[in-house]
Amino acid sequence: MQEEEKETVKLSMEQLIILFFNTIAARCWARLGLTRDEYGELRQDLKEARLGIDVLDAVLRVIEDELDDEIKRELEGVVANLKLNYVNQYSKSKEAKS
């Protein structure tokens, strides 16, 4: 039997950046305490969430002119939703400490 050759997937730079973006976004949701992380844990770390959100916002500003309108709107929506949820979780954490 011949060994099957593995086909190498070649990602464009845009595809690679979007993969990075989605990976960091998933981690942000987990660090907001709203989803389980890749280890199955549910914990909140707002400092890490904020760092990730700020990075995504910066990346989006750099690549926005290279994206088609649909993908750009989708990524903007992700960042906007993360920011809104960060504010909500931050407010809840401050109330809990009071």
Image (spheres, rainbow, N blue to C red):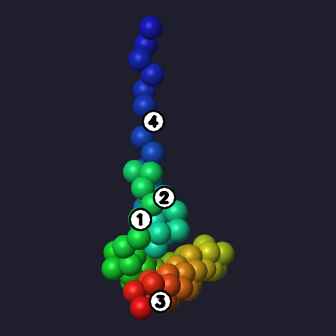
Q: Which mark is residue 43?
A: 1
> What residue is pinned by disc 2?
36
Q: CA distance from mark 1 to mark 3?
A: 18 Å
Asked if residue 27 can be seen in this view, the reply is: no
Marks 4 and 2: which is nearer the front? 2
Q: CA distance from mark 4 to mark 1?
A: 38 Å
Q: CA distance from mark 1 to mark 2?
A: 8 Å
Q: CA distance from mark 4 to mark 2?
A: 32 Å
Three-letter amino acid code at the position of disc 2:
Arg
Of mark 4 and mark 1, the one earlier in the sequence is: 4
In the image, 16 versus 29, the foreground residue is 29
Marks 3 and 2: which is nearer the front? 3
Marks 4 and 1: which is nearer the front? 1
Of mark 4 and mark 2, the one earlier in the sequence is: 4
Asked if residue 96 can be seen in this view, the reply is: yes
Three-letter amino acid code at the position of disc 4:
Glu
Q: Which mark is residue 78?
A: none
Count neighbours of disc 1 (C-alpha within 10 A) and say few if under 14, some if 14 to 19, many if 20 or more. Answer: some
Q: Secondary structure at mark 4?
A: loop
Q: Secondary structure at mark 3?
A: helix
Q: CA distance from mark 4 to mark 3?
A: 53 Å
Marks 1 and 2: which is nearer the front? 1
Residue 28 x/y as whole percent: 44, 71
> What residue is pinned by disc 4?
7
Of mark 4 and mark 3, the one earlier in the sequence is: 4
Residue 50 x/y as whole percent: 38, 81
Look at 43% across and 26% down and name the residue there.
Answer: 5
Look at 43% across and 31% down and name the residue there.
Answer: 6
Residue 16 x/y as whole percent: 43, 61
